[in-house]
Amino acid sequence: SLSIYLLAFLTFATAQSYHTAAGVRVGKYFGLTVSQRVLPKLTVEGIYQTRLQGSEQYLTGLVKKHNSLIARRLNFYYGGGVHTAWVDMGAEGGSQNFTGFDGILGLEMTIGRVNVALDYKPAFNPGQNDWMQNQGGVSVRYVLFKSNSPKSRQRQKGRSYKQKNRQKALKYRKRSLKREAKGRGW
């Protein structure tokens, strides 16, 4: 019924209203995040984060697929990626480095140049004692480069077309007035 059509429309609607956004991520870890749109509904995100009360550092790369909810500026996303971690075990334990996999599921909203995201990001660390870490976070980013919506591009194209037509009409009108003036001997 109507809800099926609405769901189908929302699934295919263009998501995201920005190209590049950068900011902070807060949760179990604190970090920096940069998100870059690479296709109309696909972004790549880089996250550097560290535990506030510890000596762990993570560098994560994610690929996320975005889908609009209600409007273009509110969307949900899901995806996955990989991370590498550096853990300082203290004076006696040395340090440990490992690589793992990440999933991500979240909601994102952009208002003006502020992008806010709330997500769940489980991290899987094969071969480690702490093989799965449940992470959630809030990211607040500043939109560095905005994208033009198809509608705004269409409006701009329409304005340009109208302006060209006005200029042509004005030139034609001036020529007509000159001809009339010559014909009357002015």
Image (cartoon, rainbow, N blue to C red):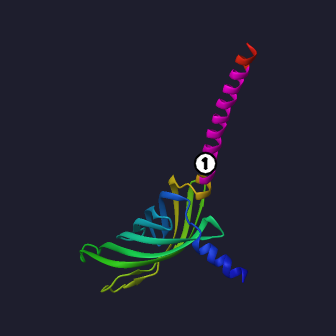
Q: Position of residue 38 (x, y in %)?
A: 44, 63
161 in magenta: yes
The residue segment tinted magenta is 154-180
Task: Identify which residue is drawn at 49% across, 58% down.
Answer: 19
Q: What's the residue at 72%, 84% (across, down)?
A: 1
Q: Is 57 or 143 nearer to us in this picture?
A: 143
In the displayed structure, 13 sits above or below 134; it is above
Where is 144 relative to 95, above or below?
A: above
Across and down, in percent, residue 56 comes to 35, 71
Q: As drawn, which residue projects farthest toward the front?
A: 183
Q: Would residue 55 be found to the left or right of residue 122 on screen?
A: left
As displayed, is residue 144 above or below residue 72? Answer: above
Q: Quadrant of the C terminus?
A: top right
- Looking at the image, the residue that sits furthest to the right is 184
Secondary structure that dominates the magenta span: helix
Residue 175: image location, x then y, percent: 66, 26
- 21 in the magenta segment: no
Element class at badge 1: helix
- Of the pair 92 and 36, the residue shown nearer to us: 36
Q: Using a 10 Å C-alpha cutoff, classify the residue at mark 1 as few (fewer than 14 neighbours), some (14 to 19) or many (20 or more).
A: few
Residue lying at 69% horizontally and 21% vertically, measured from the top left: 178
Q: Which residue is mark 1?
A: 156
**In the image, what residue occupies the spot 58% across and 72% down?**
12
Total marks in image: 1
Front residue of this view, candidates 69 and 12: 12
Image position, residue 128 (x, y; %): 32, 85
With 55 as the anchor, is 172 left or right in this view?
right
In-front residue for pair 142/69: 69
Tag 1: amino acid: Gln
